[in-house]
Image (tube, coloured by chain):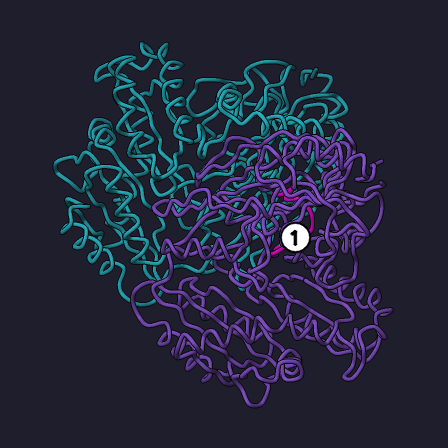
Chain colours: A purple, B cyan
């Protein structure tokens, strides 16, 4: 059983930290982007050093007060809010945001957890390098949160998820001990993969305070194109051809359904769209290549071969940086349009690649059996990761349909599970999907997770109730 | 405290398994390649199904008998032998060696743990795909062992270690429960990274029985070259240039010191060497490229640019498949020559890339202060991974110098630790490096590892004494 972060605790905590470190948490820290859940009230700590983080964790351990770690607050599964139980301490790393080191010659950057993803990308770029993790919220999301949730995004196809991009971690474990693991090594087989365990644990096993991250050389040439295709199956065949042509040089391969383009027409009509007739299915593809043939030429080769055998039906290859950026603005505006329309239920699913076509064919009728709803299916096709979001019929208000959310989510997740897919491809479990993890997760895996949680955090103070259910 | 796998236990175990599954362990299963340690006696179980594996583990749990998992027996850190304590059960997966599925269109293969690495590579090749894990012992090493030790090898630079190549695992945990985790998903954020934890745990947390592994498209063109360089620093600059020229297309970048070439002259004089005067430092580089310019042309460009500014001093670009294979035979024969010469102490270290030059400059004098010894430094330079092996002076017998081994290892490992390196880059801890892990490992990491081990294997039956010290 945990205790609330009450006034007495606030005093005790303030006593071991510099003035101004502990305050009441402003509303901003109590909310999440979709406004479906909130922390009623909380204390906020914003430490400036790992020593201060360790003191905070030790104080929480002594007082049995729960900690909710706070990155940029952009998470979509309610991992950053605690609607129920004793008021927690919110621990924000925003004041630990330094680039500690950049080893360009090693392709390594060492950053503190509070740096935004955009800051990390910019620092890499200034050194002529690429930090490839890229997602719509990168200006706000912080790297500690990206790592804690094993963030994905649009470049996973080529560069992997956040876990794949991390060489080493500094963290504070639930007993307040400091893990000094900021190795810059590409190979290190000295014991269990504690780093990989902390990454994706969503703050339930410790607080990531800094990370050594992989950088990459920048491609000599980048090419971007929109292709229209007859469906996800054709899109996957196109991807395979593009990969063969570029030896794995496809960095992004984003599937977009007509519904998303129509939402853009509705909400963001000033955005220029590449096709006058909104195509039922299109893909935004980007390739990165070494010195050699111009990427536009490779994309043209891909287009011509694929047009002639019917894999693609139309296409536009970006001819300038401005056009590339316009293509991406379109893609990155899809979530904003979704927000404005207002979803009944959103799903972040992944499927084995060969199951995608069957799923996309099956799902609409299953959802139509619940109600007349609109489906916006888009996402990172190359990773098998679809954002399969369900909306009210045209003119309908999300609020009026929200009672259908559980049925819609059950319907989608059951189809996904039956096809060997995942109910959380890149967003994590947070508090939103705890019950679904219990339902669809492997029982042996869940038992092992509970054993690990109990071993590392016996009091259950670290992000209580996220990922694993917890009485508190 | 564990019990020995005695006759009574053999009978109990045989009773729950098909005839012929349990036997006395032949000598082959009691030895390790360097013959520095052996299991005095053991029982051997060779199950044919995961159900049989689970029955074996449950029976061991009930009887408190230790299990030593056995892959191909090629490990170099004594993880597969248990010289002390009660006689264990050796559990070999050799009869579970099927390719369960190959999804070429998904770039996924699902194989049982007992398949040799060569079999997995061959199966991928037959489907027009590449399984990139590659190491000298691939004809004998089994994929379950490769995963349990997070094997490295010559293609890590581009494709990662074994952990990076695995999408999902089937395993039996220490309580006999079965982890059904053979997902083929590229993105799956449903809970802790149990897969990554089992990989590299060297059989101390469970038995891997099958894995879903990533495949890759085969490069359209492959180019291979030997370059002579003035030292490791120049080699790293050459690597950076090669990576920029190929946008990360360098698949292997192997550093070789003259001593290794002289060992080849001594032990394998029939091998053709590329340079008449054995160069002090050379690198074997391989690049894989998409359709486009011929790899030989790219290597020629690299060579000319690097010759003109002094990064390389000489070079040979393979002009045929035969020549490529001859280059690799040379590289892969280095360990065999080392075995024949007989090392005083071998080290599998990694360093931050920018520390390599300093280490290579510093180490010989430090070792010379111990005795007049020969050093063969070679390895996967692009990963910062050196096999820094120390030998008797010419004409000396390893046996006569073996008393120096602890001093030599201490000397090397202390230098490595001081430079932020790892005392085990790719071989693991096994039983050979338990004390060094205790000495150089982060105390917080070690405490967390012990807590995880106790939580998942409270009786300590899984590969007892490997990785973590254990009273038994």
Residue B191 colored magenta? yes
**Residue drawn at x 85%, y 75% as measured from the top left:** A400
Badge 1: chain ID: B
Q: Going by the picture, which residue comes out furthest to the bottom?
A: A276
Q: Residues within 10 Å of mark 1 (few under 14, many from 20)?
A: many
Looking at the image, can residue A324 be seen?
A: yes
**Residue drawn at x 31%, y 9% as measured from the top left:** B400
Residue B259 colored magenta? no
Q: Nearer the viewer, residue B175 or B309?
A: B309
Q: Main secondary structure of the magenta part?
A: loop
Q: Nearer the viewer, residue A381 or B17?
A: A381
A260 relative to B309 in the view: left or right: right
Q: Quadrant of residue B370?
A: top left
A229 relative to A105 in the view: left or right: right
**Residue drawn at x 43%, y 20% as measured from the top left:** B35
Residue B25 placement (x, y as % from top left): 58, 23
Residue A89 placement (x, y as % from top left): 74, 42
**Residue drawn at x 33%, y 21% as measured from the top left:** B343
Question: Does residue A247 sit above or below B54 in this rendering?
Answer: below
Question: Does residue A203 sit above or below B247 in this rendering?
Answer: above
Q: Quadrant of residue A425?
A: bottom right
State the extent of the magenta-drawn residues as a range: B184-195
A224 relative to B443 in the view: left or right: left
Residue B107 placement (x, y as % from top left): 52, 59
Question: Does residue B173 sit above or below A443 in this rendering?
Answer: above
Q: Which residue is mark 1?
A: B189
Residue B457 placement (x, y as % from top left): 70, 28
């Amino acid at each position: 059983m945990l205790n609330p972060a009450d006034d007495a605790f606030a005093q005790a905590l303030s006593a071991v930290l510099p003035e101004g470190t502990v305050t009441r948490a402003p509303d901003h820290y109590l909310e999440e982007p979709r406004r479906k859940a909130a922390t009623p009230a909380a204390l906020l700590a914003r430490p400036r050093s790992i020593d201060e983080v360790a003191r905070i964790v030790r104080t929480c351990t002594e007082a049995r007060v729960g900690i909710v770690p706070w990155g940029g607050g952009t998470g979509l599964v309610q991992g950053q809010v605690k609607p129920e139980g004793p008021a927690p301490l919110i621990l924000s790393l925003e004041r630990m945001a330094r680039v500690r080191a950049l080893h360009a010659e090693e392709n390594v950057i060492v950053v503190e957890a509070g740096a935004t993803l955009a800051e990390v990308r910019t620092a890499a770029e200034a050194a002529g390098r690429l930090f490839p993790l890229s997602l719509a919220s990168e200006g706000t999301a912080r790297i500690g949160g990206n790592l804690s949730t094993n963030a994905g995004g649009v470049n996973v196809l080529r560069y992997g998820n956040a876990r794949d991009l991390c060489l080493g971690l500094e963290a504070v474990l639930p007993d307040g001990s400091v893990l000094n693991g900021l190795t810059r090594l590409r190979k290190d087989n000295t014991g269990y993969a504690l780093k990989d365990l902390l990454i994706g644990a969503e703050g339930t096993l410790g607080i990531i305070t800094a990370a050594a991250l992989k950088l990459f050389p920048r491609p000599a040439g980048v090419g971007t194109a929109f292709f229209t295709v007859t469906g996800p199956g054709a899109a996957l065949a196109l991807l395979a051809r593009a990969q063969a042509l570029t030896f794995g040089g496809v960095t992004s391969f984003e599937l977009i359904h007509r519904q998303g383009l129509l939402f853009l027409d509705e909400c963001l009509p000033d955005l220029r769209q590449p096709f006058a007739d909104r195509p039922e299915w299109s893909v935004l593809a980007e390739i990165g290549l070494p010195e050699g043939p111009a990427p536009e030429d490779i994309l043209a080769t891909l287009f011509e071969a694929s047009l002639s055998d019917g894999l693609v039906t139309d296409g536009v290859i970006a001819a300038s940086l401005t056009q590339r950026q316009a293509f991406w603005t379109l893609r990155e505006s899809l979530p904003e349009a979704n927000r404005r329309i207002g979803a009944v239920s959103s799903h972040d699913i992944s499927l084995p690649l060969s199951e995608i076509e069957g799923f996309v064919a099956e799902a609409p009728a299953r959802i139509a059996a619940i109600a007349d709803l609109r489906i916006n299916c888009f996402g990172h096709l190359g990773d098998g990761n679809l954002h399969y979001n369900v909306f009210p019929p045209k003119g309908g208000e999300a609020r009026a349909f929200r009672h259908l959310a559980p049925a819609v989510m059950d319907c989608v997740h059951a189809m996904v599970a039956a096809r060997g897919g995942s109910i959380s491809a890149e967003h994590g479990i947070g508090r939103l999907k705890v019950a679904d993890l219990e339902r669809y997760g492997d029982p042996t895996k869940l038992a092992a997770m509970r054993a690990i949680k109990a071993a590392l955090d016996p009091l259950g103070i670290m992000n209580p109730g996220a990922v694993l259910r917890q009485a508190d």
